[in-house]
Image: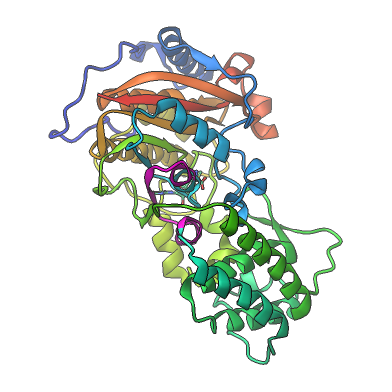
Amino acid sequence: MYKEALIPENISLVEEPQLDLFNPDKFSESDSNMLLNIVNEYYTSFEKTSPIKVINKSQFNTPVNFKQAKTIPIHRWYTYKEGFSPLFVNQFIKRYKTADENIVFDPFGGIGTTAVEAALLGFTAYSNDVNPLSNFIANVKADIYNKQDLGDLEKEKERITKYCFYRKNNPPENETVGNYFTKTTLDSVLKIQSYIDTIQNEKIRSLIFIALLTILESISTHRKDGNGVKIKKNFKGDFNVNQIVGLLTAQIELFIYDIKNKTIQTKPIISYQSSFEKYSLPQKADIVITSPPYANCFDYSKVYLVELWFGGFFKNKQDQKKFREASVISHVHYKWGLRHQDFGHRLVNNEIYDYLNDLNLWDKKIPMMLVGYFNDMGKVLYELSENLNQGATVGFVVGNSVYGGVPIATDILLAEIAMKLGFKLLGIESYRTLTPSSQQMRIIREQDKKFLRESLVILKWK
Ligand SMILES: C[S@@+](CC[C@H](N)C(=O)[O-])C[C@H]1O[C@@H](n2cnc3c(N)ncnc32)[C@H](O)[C@@H]1O
């Protein structure tokens, strides 16, 4: 057993859900089926009282699907693979809004899909994140651009095509990211960066900087792939300054078009804030729609390494460490201790931890990662509850996972943690079935596959 789940004394809990199937005699470490049966029975029993609603077809396919966002004004300014479908956010807000004055909040705001969509619908919106890159992008997307700004943007678009690029910036102090570009391309990028630094209007400087960040992957010798980057096959990677300026101006034209055609009346507040720490929103929220990192070993500081270093968001290794420390535990690239008293789930802390700890998993830290993940998520829910108005609706989009053949039904476990803290469960909607890695696919039992899904947990604050 990892340790007994212990919630701080000053927090009042509602009665535990009546789903307790634990019987120590049932579980013997030598019998893996016994553990898998306990987990399966546990989830099945939950689903009997709270059936999972399967959504077969929706206009956005699945909530975390950025494909559609790439065609929608403002949302298309930067691609965040883990970003929400704006249509999903739009529909969730309309489904649960109780008044035009409702406050919308996303505690894992990313590049601001929720905040921007809520603001476009006319709501006051707040967003927290600990990724300096995504916060920067969210801020630029959420900004208000007046006629003067638009004029400045148009002038910069002209100036860059005639600019004489003789100066260049220093490369980032991370050799690896420099190696993701050919020498010619790197040289061109650093020259363009030095031009961007000369732009007087800060809002326009940030916009053009995002245009550069947006095209970095297309001119790099590597592409994002799973939890990192992979070399592109047969890629002719040399881009001179003029070629990159061409890509950049196309992006700027898109920005001009979107700014002219869509306006935000009230700028959402985007905060650099960890959602498992104490915080106070300027006004309590009525609608929360969010998607935290999944417990799938995905490390944002690795996947966005190029943008984080080229953007100057990471200047040294300490910055990367700080980002990982402030993030919900969802991968194994860092050694965390338990940072707060345990808000986690005892099925994970006890049976699942014990079982996985005895298996020879590809990384020894996985069992502890899972304990830490639910502990962090419980703390997030607690801090969130302190920032909610009575009757607020909260939607968490989560992806379930599987380790050592054990299904980790994050949706059920999170719902139970929330119910313990006083939230009412309105329901769980499953949007798609998840396919695990081929190795997990071989070992997961047929009867456990149904728990592998991406779903929306809908909660109400009392
Ligand atoms: C799945 S993404 C959310 C994307 C977002 N829905 C969007 O459309 O852009 C999860 C986000 O949670 C952020 N995150 C991780 N730990 C956090 C924490 N402790 N507090 C706030 N944000 C955190 C990550 O940086 C990441 O941007």
The residue drawn where x is 62% and y is 32% is: 60
Residue toward you, 332 or 256: 256
Q: Is residue 290 above or below residue 457?
A: below
Q: Is residue 233 visible?
A: yes
Q: Is residue 199 above or below residue 227?
A: below
Q: Is residue 439 shown left or right of residue 31? A: right
Is 51 colored magenta in this rendering? no
Q: Is residue 106 visible?
A: no
The residue drawn where x is 30% and y is 38% is: 285
Question: Which residue is outermost to the front?
Answer: 147
Residue 99 x/y as whole percent: 34, 31
Q: How many marks?
A: 0
The residue drawn where x is 42% and y is 52% is: 265
Residue 181 x/y as whole percent: 71, 72
Residue toward you, 215 or 35: 215
Of the 4 image quadrants, the one containing the N terminus is: top left
Question: Which residue is outermost to the left?
Answer: 10
Image quadrant assignment for residue 416: top left
Residue toward you, 62 or 361: 62
Q: Is residue 422 shown left or right of residue 254? A: left
Chain part drawn in magenta: 117-142
